[in-house]
Amino acid sequence: MQPVSAVWFKKDLRVTDHAALVGAAESGGPVLPLYIYEPEQLHHEEFGGHHLDYLNECLRDLAQRLAQLGSPLVIRRGEAVAVLEALSREISIGSLWAHQETGNGVSFARDLRVHAWARARGIPFYEPPQQGVFRRMVDRDRWADAWEARMSQSPVPPPVLRPPAKALRSEGCLDHRALKVERNLKVIPQGGETAARSVLDSFLAQRGRDYMWAMSSPLTAEDACSRLSAPLAFGTVSLRTVLLETRQALARSLGDQGADPRWVRSLRSFESRLHWHDHFIQRLESEPRLEFENLNRAYDGLREPHWNEEYFDRWCQGQTGYPLIDACMRMLQATGWLNFRMRAMLVSFASHHLWLHWRRPGLFLARQWLDNEPGIHWSQMQMQSGTVGINRSRVYSPTRQAREQAAG
């Protein structure tokens, strides 16, 4: 029986512009698409019931697309190495493919275990990059040029797949009860590559015109922001696809003398934020300790002795008495989303007004964001808390923000 090329999907739940899937298909043999429900991630402090709701929608869409390409998605649950070892007893794995992932400390430790397993079994493990983040980059001064060179390449189309000769058991999408994940009542958008495509199209054709002016106010940002943060975090659309289609839309606006000038400014503003998206993930890739400790150790001990549990509880529950702070927290708990300015204000308020160390508020917020991206999240927790030691500290006034932003 011919060995298979196994493609392990993690935070890249799509078939378009998927370098690992294309690489496996180009090997010429059968391709085994694989997703693993990992208990250590499902029960991580950053994971909530709404994440599973969204994940399962992504998986259902992915399974349908893979079946159309020729090879069904196999879903298993368990610790990654244990699942791969059991799978290798059922079918010959000739190679393992997965995109590079810059995730939390748990996912990094898991990836090291998988690498060790593959080496011990003599199985080549290929990890092509899926975004503008670079492993072992010592000199970040060259990052911008390297990012542009990689991200300006054309997205790759979905490949045709040969299925394994042997049909393999798949557990299918599992619910909260089966996976022992607590449900919550957040109202979240539809997940999956189909939905991501629709969101991108609507932003570039309609909603994005006033992006530059409307993204800061919580009253206008819900519609004017791209709303692509969750699709990017779950990988149902690649950042390269978003970047290149944004540039195409910008070129059309620049070439059309009758075009609304608001589009040009908004698309340029949005493109710059796509650049910053990977910039912050690169920071975590290069300095993974920022998930757990102050990036600048001179700030150690600054807030820790002054922890106030009541302040923290009131902040979490949206009961601080500051109307905009409380409204934002309640919106977050209802929907899993806030615009960037309000996210920064919540962190600034916790760190500077309540004088809380950023780690526990950071875990709470990570669990609430539907679009939680560890590199962006932990970088922003430290920046808004003033513990980076490079950027000027920003202290957001909740009363001023209420006057300037909540008034629209």
Image: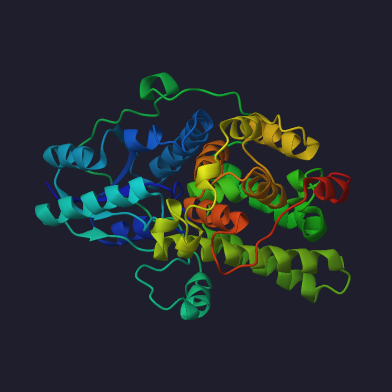
Q: As drawn, is 96 to the left or to the right of 142?
A: left
Q: What colour scheme has been applied to the protein in the rendered image?
A: rainbow
Q: Residue at x 47, y 57 (%)?
A: 294
Q: Position of residue 38 (x, y in %)?
A: 33, 36
Q: How many marks?
A: 0
* 69 lies above or below 146: above
> Foreground: 340 or 244?
340
Residue farthest toward the top in the current orientation of the protein: 177
Q: Position of residue 306 (x, y in %)?
A: 55, 42
Residue 115 image-quadrant placement: bottom left
Foreground residue, 12 or 25? 12
Identify which residue is drawn at 71% across, 55% down: 395
378 and 160: which is toward the camera: 378
Q: Is residue 45 above or below residue 128?
A: above
Give me the residue at 76% from left, 32% from top: 321
The residue nearer to you, when weighing 347 against 23, is 347
Residue 390 locus on image (x, y percent)? 57, 69
Point 47% across, 80% down: residue:
142
* Residue 239 visible in the current orientation: yes
Residue 173, image quadrant: top left
Snapshot quadrant of residue 262: bottom right
Extreme-front residue of the structure: 305
Give the percent coordinates (x, y) of residue 304: 50, 46
Residue 405 in sight here: no
